[in-house]
């Protein structure tokens, strides 16, 4: 059974096609957690790393039984150097210990051996002597298509060989995405051309639900374009950012799902992990996150 089949099984079991984005900016981390780590480690990257990891574990503990996946955005960890990366890896391992799927939001890619190294780091295994180890151990990874098909082949190979998945950037949720993605080439916008390629690349890898592990990132903030992409990518599973804080609504993103209510997973980050802000005591942040996750779930399900 392929990774997307397994993810859809979990979505169906929980009746929840959503993913919690673990993008822990410092002002999202409750003050009592930061102060605890500052008292222990001083004002250091180590303190921040431990605070972020504790915050993430409390969020995961609050939602793992109702949400199928998490999506840690690596930039929020990389900014703290090696200690931040340590928190990232520990977060992935902790989420997987709770049987959650992990989408590494890293938007990686490059040519030749560099692209292959990214693929190995996030999705594959590295061999050291006679031992093989996972560096990050994610289930799925966001990648950029800008360098062309040959740059994506190492990632597709890992999908094929190790039951992993990728989400290729197609139509992103940011306001300026149209600067390049909407440019016309032979009368078609670039995002449609990329979508057509993705549908083609996944042909031989489709699972029992009809979707391949070569997925697409399609923003909830662009309803008309998302509807068009669902038409030209009927077998492509979508990661849909932009819900909530970025302005995307459940009604907008409903076009990303097929007639059976399948085909997409919707992300919310600050709307979940910072839900406690102005609503409850910081010590109850995880309760606010759970409530926000339930509200999001019910909102999406109502519209699909």
Image (tube, rainbow, N blue to C red):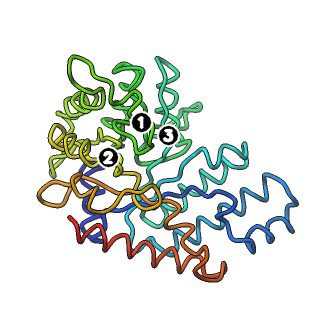
**Badge 2 local density, few (<14 within 10 Å), some, or many (20+)?**
some
Identify the residue at image location x=27%, y=49%: 223
Find residue 114 and report its horizontal and vertical position in percent: 52, 22
Find residue 85 and report its horizontal and vertical position in percent: 65, 46
The disc label shown at residue 222, or none: 2
Q: Earlier in the sequence, mark 1 or mark 2?
A: 1
Q: Earlier in the sequence, mark 3 or mark 2?
A: 3
In this picture, is 205 found above or below 294?
above
Identify the residue at image location x=32%, y=41%: 216
Residue to which mark 3 is pinned: 122
Question: For the residue labelled by badge 3, is the local secondary structure a helix, a strand or a loop?
Answer: helix
Residue to which mark 1 is pinned: 177
Identify the residue at image location x=25%, y=69%: 301
Question: For the residue labelled by badge 1, is the local secondary structure a helix, a strand or a loop?
Answer: helix
Question: Distance from label 1 to label 2 (Cα)?
Answer: 10 Å
Check contact, mark 1 vs mark 2: CB within 8 A. yes
Find residue 304 and report its horizontal and vertical position in percent: 20, 64
Check contact, mark 1 vs mark 3: CB within 8 A. no
Q: Nearer the viewer, mark 1 or mark 3?
A: 1
Choose top left, top right, bottom left or bottom right for residue 282: bottom right
**Badge 3 local density, few (<14 within 10 Å), some, or many (20+)?**
many
**Badge 1 local density, few (<14 within 10 Å), some, or many (20+)?**
some
Q: Earlier in the sequence, mark 1 or mark 3?
A: 3
Find residue 145 and report its horizontal and vertical position in percent: 38, 27
Check contact, mark 3 vs mark 2: CB within 8 A. no
Question: Distance from label 3 to label 2 (Cα)?
Answer: 29 Å
Identify the residue at image location x=16%, y=37%: 232
In this picture, is 273 found above or below 106?
below
Question: Distance from label 1 to label 3 (Cα)?
Answer: 26 Å
The disc label shown at residue 191, or none: none
């Amino acid at each position: 059974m392929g990774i997307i089949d397994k993810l859809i099984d979990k979505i169906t079991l929980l009746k929840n096609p959503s993913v919690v984005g673990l993008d822990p900016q410092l002002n999202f981390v409750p003050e009592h957690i930061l102060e605890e780590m500052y008292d222990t480690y001083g004002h250091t990257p180590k303190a921040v790393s431990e605070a972020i990891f504790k915050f993430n574990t409390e969020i995961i503990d609050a939602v793992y039984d109702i949400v199928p996946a998490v999506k840690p955005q690596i930039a929020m960890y990389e900014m703290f150097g090696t200690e931040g990366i340590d928190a990232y890896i520990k977060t992935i391992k902790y989420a997987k210990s709770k049987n959650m799927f992990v989408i590494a939001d890293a938007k990686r890619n490059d040519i030749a051996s560099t692209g292959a190294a990214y693929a190995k780091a996030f999705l594959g295994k590295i061999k050291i002597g006679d031992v093989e180890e996972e560096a990050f151990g994610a289930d799925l990874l966001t990648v950029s298509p800008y360098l062309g098909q040959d740059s994506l082949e190492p990632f597709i190979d890992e999908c094929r060989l190790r039951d992993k998945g990728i989400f290729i950037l197609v139509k992103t949720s940011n306001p300026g995405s149209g600067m390049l993605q909407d440019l016309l080439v032979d009368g078609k916008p670039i995002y449609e051309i990329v979508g057509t390629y993705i549908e083609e690349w996944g042909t031989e890898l489709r699972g029992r639900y009809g979707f391949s592990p070569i997925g697409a990132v399609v923003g909830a903030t662009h309803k008309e374009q998302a509807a068009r992409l669902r038409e030209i990518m009927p077998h492509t599973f979508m990661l849909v950012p932009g819900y909530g804080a970025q302005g995307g609504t459940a009604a907008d993103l409903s076009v990303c799902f097929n007639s059976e209510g399948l085909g997409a997973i919707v992300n919310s980050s600050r709307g979940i992990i910072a839900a406690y802000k102005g609503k409850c005591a910081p010590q109850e942040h995880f309760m606010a996150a759970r409530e926000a996750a339930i509200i999001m779930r019910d909102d999406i399900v109502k519209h699909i």
